Image (spheres, helix red, strand yellow):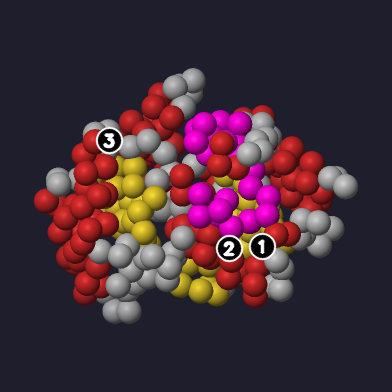
Amino acid sequence: MIKCIASDMDGTLLNSKEKISEENKKVIEMAQAKGVEVVIATGRSYKEARHALDAAELKCSVISLNGAVVWDEEGNVVVSNPIGLDDFKKARKLLDEYNLHYEIYTNEGTYTYSKDQSVASLIDILVSAMPEINPLYIAEKANERFELDLVTLIDDYDQLYNIPDIEFYKLLVYSGNIPLLEEFGGKLKQQTPLAISSSGPGNLEITSIDAQKGKALSDFVAERKIDLSDTMAIGDSFNDISMFEKVGKPIAMGNAPVEIKQLCGEETLSNNENGVAKAIWKALNDK
């Protein structure tokens, strides 16, 4: 019997308009009413995740930044797994050597040194991932991160070291040059113990080795005395693999890459077809 459901956001719970559908919302609330724990496991910051959840009026615990920070339903930090300062500086040095654009996620917010580069990079990634969507709409959503104060512009990342008690949670790297990203990722693995994953083509997500969705979910269910065998994880990308490998019921989205579908062995509909709702409904009614 499923007692906990972990859902990814982008490409999973959210449709291509970055909204939670009414059907997904209703089925999640139905599961919660039956006593099932529902947790969002995302690469997004808590602020960005909450923006989407609040729009749908959904209340859930959140594993943010791939497990770097875990939040309860009331918005309190339960666990944080920041990147060690030495490893963070090594990663930054290598990123600069490769001339790669990146954003920094911290306990004080998300930062970029170039709005134009952040917007352009995100547009390129989203257009390649969702070619059916109007590029003008994608550009509007990319700019919305700044309009909603979800990302802060900073002249020099070195200024962040002067913020008292700052914690560095994630480096989000953008590039349309996939071979360059792969070369950088391989070099970073040689130089640091950091975790490297990806939420789609053209990006890398760098976190502490302890900040992975699978580990965070394992700790989350253990605290609630729920077995991983009674846990379901739904996702569409490679940063969901650590969850899929641990839970009793991994479910791939219909829009997931073939490698993810093969790993899970079971798939639902796409994120534009209320795939999360279908997966949860089936699990709750599976005898």
From this view, report whether residue 130 is shown above or below residue 31: above
- Answer left or right for 172 relative to 17: left
Amino acid, disc 2: Leu
Q: Which residue is mark 1?
A: 228
- Please say whether residue 53 is visible from this viewpoint: no
Q: Position of residue 97 (x, y in %)?
A: 11, 51
Residue bearing the label numbered 3: 178
Looking at this view, is 74 or 28 the one in front? Answer: 28
Disc 1 or 2, which lies upstream in sequence? 2
The mark nearer the N terminus, 2 or 3, is 3
**Left or right, residue 218 beside residue 5:** left
Residue 217's disc is 2
Whole-percent x, y for residue 262 in the image: 56, 36
Residue 270 seen by the camera: yes
- With 109 as the anchor, is 264 left or right in this view? right
Mark 3: few, some, or many residues within 10 Å (few <14, many ≥20)?
few
Seen at 33% across and 31% down, the residue is 124
Spatial CA distance of label 2 from label 3 is: 29 Å
